[in-house]
Image (cartoon, rainbow, N blue to C red):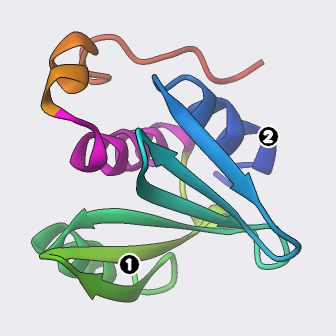
Amino acid sequence: MAVSSDEFFRVVDALVDVERSQNEQYSSFSVRGKRFGYYWPRTQTVGLKQTLSEQQALVAERPDVFEEQFTAGGFGWVVVHLAGVEVDELSELVFEAWRLSAPEDLVAETPDWAEQPPTLRS
């Protein structure tokens, strides 16, 4: 059930126009200058941009896997514990975070992962 760091990075790398920034404690991910995610290697967690309703639903449904991180600009950021999530679910959450940040023209050019999921497992 657990998702490895390598699997998480393959999910992110399958997206279009992702920029990665790293410092000593975490990596951040943006699309055309707009942040959509974080990765903390020490805790094996990721932070992902979601709608407020999705943030609340995830945390209410499985508080052992999802935590409320913060809210900003009408969005709710959620912490995901990689040990408690499956790669397909994480892929959908990462795609949604990317989609919420990407420009409309880029989203329109990108196939929906529900229809064409990337190959993630090696």
Spatial CA distance of label 1 from label 2 is 23 Å
21 horizontally vs 85: left or right: right
| 113 is higher (above) or lower (below) than 98 | above
x and y percent of residue 88 in the render? 46, 37
| 85 is higher (above) or lower (below) than 87 | below
Q: Amino acid at mark 2?
A: Asp
x and y percent of residue 104 in the render? 13, 31
Residue 62: image tag: 1
| 37 is higher (above) or lower (below) than 44 | above
Q: At x 56% / y 51%, what residue is drawn?
A: 29
Q: In what quadrant of the picture does the C terminus appear? A: top right
113 horizontally vs 4: left or right: left
Q: Give the mark nearer the N terminus: 1 vs 2.
A: 2
Magenta stretch in the rendered image: 87-103
Q: Is residue 117 magenta?
A: no
Q: Amino acid at mark 1?
A: Arg
Local SS, label 2: helix
| 108 is higher (above) or lower (below) than 73 | above
x and y percent of residue 68 in the render? 37, 87
Which quadrant of the view contains residue 25? bottom right
User: Which mark is nearer the camera, 1 or 2?
Assistant: 2
Local SS, label 1: loop
Q: Dot 2: few (<14), some (14–19), or many (≥20) neighbours within 10 Å?
A: few
Where is mark 2, residue-wise? Answer: 6
Magenta region, main secondary structure: helix
State the residue lying farthest toward the front: 33
Front residue of this view, candidates 60 and 75:
75
Q: At x 79% / y 40%, what residue is drawn?
A: 6
Q: Dot 1: few (<14), some (14–19), or many (≥20) neighbours within 10 Å?
A: few
